[in-house]
Amino acid sequence: MSELWAKDLNEGDRRGLTDIAELLITKQIGDGGPSDAKTRNDSLSAMRRVLIDSQNLMVAVGGKMHAADGIIPGVAEEMDLAARKHLPRFLLAGMGGYAAEYAKDLIPAALHNGLSDEENLLLFSTNDISACVNVLFDHLATSRDIRLKIKMVAHTYTAPPQPFSQS
């Protein structure tokens, strides 16, 4: 989470978040607030780089369109960052949002996820969550190639940056 929003969390909310997940707070970039497009974009980009650096594969679902507000769509930036890191990517675009827009010009093989074109096209088009989960879990459990890619990325993985702490 970016400091841009985390600074407004009370202690109870922070504890609630850390009860369900590791909370890593990245620095705010810029002096504006969440409504300032440059501060928001720069802060979220910094957070997304930390997120992608800690992953060994990428699954994107939905996402806000941000057609005319100057905000960079998160799905696009995260998928592009993951591609640069050569992570296997999975795009569940059938639920709509920016993921559906991103899928329009995407060649399934460009995801380097080991799924067939037909399986990727199913993930691009269906809004059946069970079908998506079945395709992903079956592939992750049975694909030797994807396990090797994950193992290779995990082997080259360096320790995540230390969480930002307010002192």
Image (cartoon, helix red, strand yellow):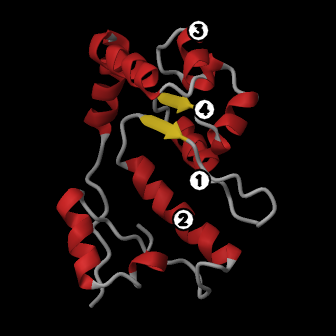
Residue 152 location, x and y as percent?
31, 27
Q: Is residue 155 above or below residue 122?
A: below
Residue at mark 1: 74
In the rendered image, the vertical position of residue 14 relative to residue 145, given as above or below: below
For label 3, the SS is: helix
Residue at 62% across / 86% down in the picture?
32
CA distance separating discs 3 and 1 = 26 Å
The residue positioned 22% from the left and 65% from the top of the image is: 18
User: Distance between the Cα atoms at labels 2 and 1?
Assistant: 8 Å
Specify the amino acid type for callout 1.
Answer: Gly
Q: Which residue is mark 3?
A: 118
Along the polypeptide, which appears first: circle 4 or circle 1? Answer: 1
Nearest the eye: 99 or 106: 99
Residue name at image x 24 percent, y 59 percent: 22
Q: Residues within 10 Å of mark 3 (few under 14, many from 20)?
A: few
**Residue 93: numbered disc:** 4
- CA gap between label 4 and label 3 equals 14 Å
Rendered image: mark on residue 44: 2
Sequence-wise, which precedes: disc 4 or disc 3? 4
- Going by the numbered disc 3, the residue's amino acid type is Glu
> Label 1 neighbourhood size at 10 Å, few (<14), some (14-19), many (20+)?
many
Quadrant of image for the N terminus: bottom left
Q: Residues within 10 Å of mark 4 (few under 14, many from 20)?
A: many
| Sequence order check, earlier mark of 3 and 2 | 2
| In this rendering, the label closer to the viewer, 2 or 4 | 4
Query: Is residue 150 left or right of 114 when viewed as pictured?
Result: left
Q: Residues within 10 Å of mark 2 (few under 14, many from 20)?
A: many
Residue type at the position of mark 2: Leu
